[in-house]
Image (cartoon, rainbow, N blue to C red):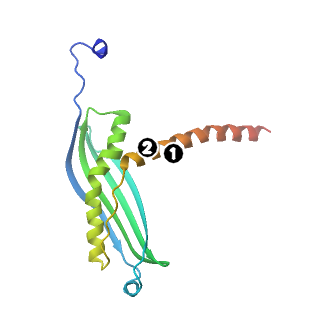
Amino acid sequence: MADEQAVPGQEAPQQQFSLQRIYTKDLSFESPSSPAIFRKQWQPKVNVDLNTKSDKLDDNGNYEVVLTITLTAKVEEETAFLVEVQQAGIFFITGIEGENLRRVLGTACPNILFPYARENIDAVCIKGGFPAVMLAPVNFDALYQQALAQAQAQAGDAAPAAAEGGEAATH
């Protein structure tokens, strides 16, 4: 049945996805409580924040994807260290559009970048005098689905809130 909808003489665009370059866009390490922090027992509370951003670089199918990981380690209430890395990549993507393109940029690309970001974080923490940091693998597919669900919930909540606000203004 799919053949019935195909236009004669036109082929579907071939899907292509390839990595062009991986690079560290930004790397920051702070240890505001050193050297006193080294005298404390090392039982840190670690907070990890992840964020991804993508930009179309040109009309040829090149996209930059930036994975930002911010890791904060505190001992008691003192910040032992704060490290932030922006691991970036240039990806060539053609023949993929709409929701499928957003999914590739939000899941496949960060999955490729994550091991490089994790290694950067580990190396800089060791050089800062702290124990190795091995971040657990991240399920970017699940995070993408969660972000979609949140966006849909917010869009759904905005309509009733706007309607309620409008009614309140008329009373």
**The residue positioned farthest toward the right in the image shown:** 171
Residue at the (30%, 72%) spot, across then down: 132
Instruction: Looking at the picture, tell me which residue is in the foreground, 74 or 137.
Output: 137
- Tell me the distance, in whole angstroms, between the alpha carbons under discs 1 and 2: 9 Å
Instruction: Say if 133 sits above or below 63 in the image.
Output: below
Residue at the (31%, 66%) spot, across then down: 134
Amino acid carrying mark 1 in the image: Gln
Q: Residues within 10 Å of mark 1 (few under 14, many from 20)?
A: few
Among the 4 quarters of the image, the one containing residue 27: bottom left
Residue at the (22%, 21%) spot, across then down: 11
On the image, the x and y values in percent for residue 137 come to: 33, 56
Query: Sequence order check: which comes first, mark 1 or mark 2?
Result: 2
Instruction: Looking at the picture, tell me which residue is in the foreground, 6 or 94.
Output: 6
Numbered circle sitting on residue 170 = none
Label 1, secondary structure: give it: helix
Numbered circle sitting on residue 145 = 2
Which residue bears the numbered disc 1? 150
Among the 4 quarters of the image, the one containing residue 56: top left
Quadrant position of the N terminus in the picture: top left
**Image side of residue 75 versus residue 60, left or right:** right
On the image, the x and y values in percent for residue 125 come to: 30, 73
| Residues under numbered marks 1 and 2 in contact, where contact means CB atoms less than 8 Å apart | no
Amino acid carrying mark 2 in the image: Gln
Instruction: Say if 70 sits above or below 10 in the image.
Output: below
On the image, the x and y values in percent for residue 100 come to: 35, 35
Quadrant position of the C terminus in the picture: top right
Q: Residues within 10 Å of mark 2 (few under 14, many from 20)?
A: some
